[in-house]
Structures are given as structure tokens and as C-alpha cells.
């Protein structure tokens, strides 16, 4: 090859460290997944307890659906933490105590919905930094599932079956 022809070195980007490429490193992923796991565990426990306080509406059905989702995502997050050789936290997020201090089931549902929105924001911040395609896909499904739950809760809260407004 003549010296005057331009050439490019071989690209090794696919072999670069995740952090170098702008992705979250192992420790950051473990911290984020653990925080999400503890929040999901709190959501599961809140939804479970709230089914017992359910008014005679679609509230109980919604809480059972939310609980099923939260349990599913707890298992998914724990699976990825194990893949990262991390200790899987057994803690429940502080959100649980705050929510259970709310006696009115409708107010608790509105509070739980704000927690679901927090999870969506956390996921949207984390997802662009996830290099693992499988984890990314599962986090996207988790985000989408939370969006559905948020919409369902908002529909119930704003429905005629929802909380009665003072006259």
C-alpha cells in the first residue's frame, strides 16, 4: 500500500470497557438494581396489604394486578443481581412504611402511584446506560408495565367508583 493512501486503524470499540463507553459499571448497576428491587418489594407489600382494605370497587383487582407485577419484577431484578455476583438485598424500601401510614385506601393508592412514577423515572435514567441487551429489554418491559399500572390507577382514581369528593 502506498504511503500517501489514508488508512484507519482497526476499531476495538466492541472490546472497550463498559464505563469507558459511557455505560454503567458493575457497581453502579448493582446499586441501581438493588434500589429498584427494594422499591419493588415495598410496592408488592403495599399492594398485598391494600387488597385487605379494598373498597367494593375495582380497587382490589388493581392491587392484585400490581402485586403480581411487583413480585415478577422483584424476581427479575434478583436474577440479574445474582448474574452480577451481587448479594441480593432482602430489605424493603422505606416507601412501604410511608405508604402503610396512610389509612385511607384511595390516598394510599395515589401515593403508590407516585411511587410507580418514581420507578419509571429511575428506569428511564438507567436504561440508556445499560449495555446488556437482555437486562435492557427486561428493564424496558418493567417500565412499560409500570406505565400501564399508573394509567390503570389514574383511571380508577378518576372514575365514579373512585374516591368520593367532598360535597
Image (tube, grey):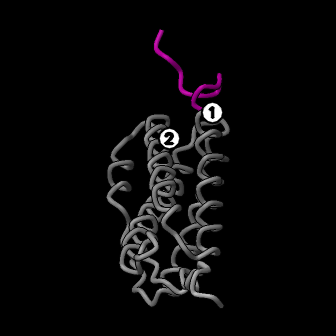
Can you give x and y, in whole percent of width and height, for residue 90 in the image? Answer: 39, 77
Label 1 crowd bin: few (<14), some (14–19), many (20+), radius 10 Å: some
Residue 160 among magenta residues: yes
Nearest the eye: 15 or 39: 15
Looking at the image, which residue sits at the far top?
167
Q: Residue at x 39, y 40 (%)?
A: 103
Can you give x and y, in whole percent of width and height, for residue 73 in the image? Answer: 58, 67
Disc 2 to disc 1, C-alpha distance:
10 Å
Can you give x and y, in whole percent of width and height, for residue 163 in the image? Answer: 54, 26
- The range drawn in magenta is 155-167
Residue highlighted by disc 2? 109
Q: Residue at x 66, y 35 (%)?
A: 57
Q: Is residue 27 above or below residue 107?
A: below
Q: Which element carries disc 2, helix, strand or loop?
A: helix
* 2 and 1 marks in contact (CB < 8 Å): yes
Q: Residue at x 47, y 37 (%)?
A: 110
Residue highlighted by disc 1? 156
Amino acid at each position: 500500500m502506498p504511503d500517501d493512501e489514508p488508512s484507519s486503524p482497526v476499531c476495538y470499540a466492541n472490546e472497550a470497557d463498559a464505563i469507558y463507553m459511557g455505560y454503567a459499571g458493575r457497581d453502579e448497576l448493582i446499586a441501581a438494581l438493588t434500589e429498584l428491587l427494594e422499591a419493588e418489594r415495598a410496592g408488592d407489600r403495599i399492594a398485598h396489604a391494600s387488597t385487605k382494605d379494598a373498597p367494593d370497587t375495582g380497587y382490589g383487582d388493581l392491587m392484585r394486578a400490581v402485586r403480581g407485577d411487583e413480585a415478577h419484577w422483584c424476581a427479575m431484578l434478583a436474577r440479574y443481581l445474582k448474574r452480577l455476583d451481587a448479594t441480593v438485598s432482602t430489605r424493603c424500601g422505606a416507601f412501604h412504611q410511608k405508604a402503610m401510614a396512610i389509612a385511607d385506601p384511595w390516598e394510599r393508592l395515589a401515593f403508590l402511584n407516585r411511587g410507580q412514577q418514581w420507578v419509571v423515572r429511575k428506569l428511564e435514567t438507567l436504561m440508556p446506560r445499560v449495555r446488556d441487551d437482555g437486562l435492557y429489554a427486561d428493564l424496558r418491559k418493567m417500565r412499560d408495565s409500570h406505565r400501564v399500572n399508573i394509567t390503570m390507577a389514574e383511571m380508577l382514581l378518576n372514575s365514579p367508583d373512585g374516591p368520593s369528593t367532598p360535597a
